[in-house]
Amino acid sequence: MSDVILPAYANWARYNQRLREAVAPLTVEQLSLQPAPDRWPLWATIGHLACQRVSALCGLAGEPGADTTPFPNALYECPGDEDLDHPLDAAALVASIDSTFHIIERCLTTWTLAMLSEEIRHTFDDGEWARTRGAILHGAAAHDMYHCAELNESFGRLGLPQIDLWS
């Protein structure tokens, strides 16, 4: 398949690896730090990042694999968003990062350019929702980068090593 979209998102695997490397050595104490009173603890932000991958790609775009992650009901149950009562340690977060990235990898190696323009519709309690497959994927990538930047700001403030996305 020469028209798969992987080349357009080739750096995502490296970004994921750098996120994983930054999270793996964190202690339970470090992961429970809140960068500000109105912000989630670090574990919740990292768990939210991973869970929202499943929400977007499985819950919205219809991809299989949610059951291979800790977030089988990601549209409605994610760390931070709906759950601040069950802290995740570094091992659980790394496993979440890995398992959710497998879904991303499958999309990047099987979706084609033509598939990106397909519209996906859902009906939720608060109304209708429609996006293209490409918009959903782009949103998932942008969401990852947003939270990596947020984590870097927090890590820097707390004296922790940052996620190095650039080298």
Image (cartoon, rainbow, N blue to C red):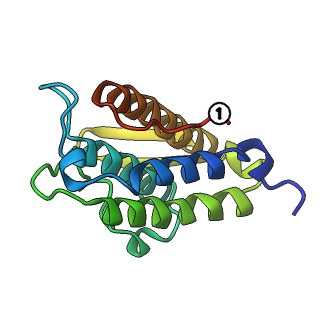
Q: Measuring from the top left, give residue 6's x and y in whole percent.
A: 75, 52
Q: Quadrant of residue 24?
A: bottom left
Residue corresponding to mark 1: 166
**Is 38 placed left or right of 149 in the picture?**
left
* 123 lies above or below 38: below
Pointer 1 local density, CA inside 10 Å: few below 14, some 14–19, many at least 20:
few
- Say which residue appears at 34% left-offset and 66% top-offset: 91
Looking at this view, name the residue that lies furthest to the bottom: 68
* 25 lies above or below 37: below
Count numbered badges in the picture. 1
Res 71 visible: no
Foreground of the two, 55 or 104:
104
Q: Quadrant of residue 106?
A: bottom right
Foreground of the two, 123 or 47:
47
Mark 1 residue element: loop
- Say which residue appears at 48% left-offset and 40% top-offset: 144
**Is 4 placed left or right of 26 in the picture?**
right
Q: Measuring from the top left, give residue 84's x and y in whole percent.
A: 13, 49
- Say which residue appears at 26% left-offset and 48% top-offset: 43
Q: Amino acid at mark 1?
A: Trp
Quarter of the rendering occupied by the N terminus: bottom right
Quarter of the rendering occupied by the C terminus: top right
Looking at this view, name the residue that lies furthest to the right: 2
**Is 147 placed left or right of 117 in the picture?**
left
Res 12 visible: yes
Q: Measuring from the top left, give residue 140's x and y in whole percent.
A: 51, 43
- Say which residue appears at 42% left-offset and 31% top-offset: 152
Q: Measuring from the top left, give residue 166's x and y in whole percent.
A: 65, 33
**Is 137 placed left or right of 28 in the picture?**
right
Foreground of the two, 16 or 108:
16
Looking at this view, name the residue that lies furthest to the front: 159
